[in-house]
Amino acid sequence: MSARDSERVLIDIENGIATVTLNRPEKYNGLDMPMFEAITRAARTLKKDRSVRAIILCGAGEAFCSGLDVKTVSKNPVNFLKLLIKPGRKISNLAQDVGYLWRDVPAPVIAVTHGYCFGGGFQVALGADFRFTTADCEFSIMESKWGLIPDMSLTVTLRELVPIDLAKELTMTARRFNGTEAKAMGLVSRVSDDPMSEALAFARELAARSPDAVAAGKLLFNRGWSATDKVALDWETKLQKKVLGRANQRIAVARNSGSPDKPYQDRRDF
């Protein structure tokens, strides 16, 4: 891998907030093989970093991500095999990892979109916990335009946000819609003239909470949202046992009882 390829994704961490930047602006951050690998590497790296409290995922240049760079990836047919094969006992392949792995990162992830957010790029954003966007950002589940279906974890992430008929419509038509429409459909969390500033303010708010409670809250809903009542209730109890009476829970009590500046410890493993 060249030095240029290794810089496909940049990670900057300050005060517990990681900014992850897709860094192929000359191609609207299109997904080539080095980009696939760099995104998954970034997610795995941040999953292990227990000091990270929140993550902002954004794109350099004029777009968040224009989706799969078909021309570049298709130069070598082996690339499609690399993207679609599931090694060992993994439940996701490399194509799916760029969106799905962000769900496994214990810290909350905020995708900040602008310009274009198409196809695979949209599926990367759907893997985040929150999506902040500009009103004029263009979105599309674009795969059907090329005779394909979405295959980068959208079947897991989209079903949590919209009803099945809308999911089918957007997938089958590949129509474009803007940030305002995306908000009305429930696909984004906030629309703003400056979504990066709002995301940073929100990340700071999250970073001020117990990292154990935030991580457990993310896991609770990811595991319980579509589960049976029994499974969902079991997860409530299981995760509460992991935070109740632990160091960060005691610190949270102290911060609300006369010691507001008492620092939290790094997040526990979940």
Image (cartoon, rainbow, N blue to C red):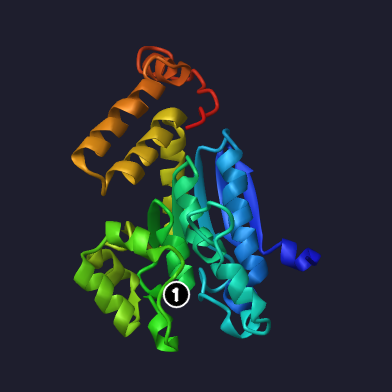
- Work out whether 44 lies above or below 60: above
Which residue is identified by label 1?
Answer: 119
Up-down relation of residue 238 to residue 43 (above or below): above
| Image quadrant assignment for residue 186 | bottom left
As drawn, 20 above or below 63: above
Few, some or many residues within 10 Å of mark 1 (<14, 14–19, 20+): many
- Mark yes or no: residue 227 visible: yes
Q: Residue, x 67% and y 67% (percent of image)?
A: 34
Number of numbered discs on residues: 1
Nearer to us in this view, 19 or 223: 223
In terms of image quadrants, where is residue 125?
A: bottom left
Badge 1 element: helix
Could you tell me the amino acid type at mark 1?
Answer: Gly
Q: Is residue 143 left or right of residue 59?
A: left
| Quadrant in which the N terminus appears | bottom right
Q: Position of residue 189 (x, y in %)?
A: 32, 56
Which residue is outermost to the right?
2
Residue reaching furthest to the front? 88
Decide which of 26, 266 is in the foreground and name it. Answer: 266
How far from the left and from the top, in percent, is residue 206? Answer: 42, 38
Q: Is residue 24 visible?
A: no
Task: Please indicate whether residue 60 sits to the left or right of residue 204 in the image.
Answer: right
Q: Residue at x 47, y 32 (%)?
A: 270
